Image: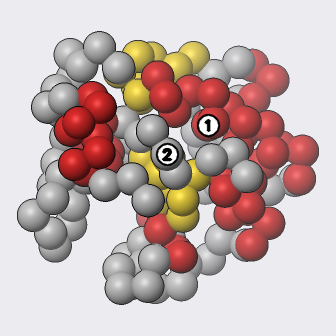
Amino acid sequence: MVKSIDCFNKYGTPTAKNKFLKLLIVPKHLQIEHLPSKIFCNVDMHEPFQYALAHLISTGCANDIKTFDGCFNIRKMRNASAMSLHSWGIAIDLNAFENQMFTKGKFSKKFVECFKSAGFDWGGDWEKRTDPMHFQLKTI
């Protein structure tokens, strides 16, 4: 699992001017209601995220997305001292209203698999700090 130290080592200090952060313009055929068509995120996330979107559409899970709750946001992890992976734009939060930290969340296994098969870890799998709204790149 990617940790903040891995991001520091690869991407440097979190900043909006980081050379690894670029605007992803989601192709029309991958646009999903409730998701922005432009997302400021890490270039390493562009391809896996588009792959996840294609899976969501092909499996009929795209309609399960109700809210987009963020990607790039320089901040510390909630209730922790380490920087959030959102600080480098390699994580995304979805449907936060029903997928609160420390719960099992409401995403179906099929939905989660769309992201996992695209190269993401899911916060709902974490043992001590479940965070089912959270999907982050598995490797960088």
| Residue highlighted by disc 2 | 139
Can see residue 14?
yes
Q: Where is residue 44 drawn, in percent x and y?
A: 49, 28
Rounded to the nearest angstrom, the CA distance separating label 2 from label 1 is: 13 Å
How packed is label 1: few (under 14 Cα within 10 Å), some, or many (20 or more)? many
Q: Quadrant of residue 29?
A: top right
Q: Is residue 73 above or below residue 132?
A: above
Kind of residue at badge 1? Phe
Mark 2 / mark 1, whichever is N-terminal = 1
Horizontal side of residue 36 vs 90, given as left or right? right
Please give the label number shown on residue 49: 1
Q: Quadrant of residue 49?
A: top right
Horizontal side of residue 71 vs 125, given as left or right? left
Please give the label number shown on residue 108: none
Horizontal side of residue 60 vs 15, given as left or right? right
Instruction: Check disc 2 and report its element: helix, strand or loop.
Output: loop
Q: Residue at x 19, y 29 (%)?
A: 12
Q: Where is residue 84 drawn, in percent x and y?
A: 25, 52
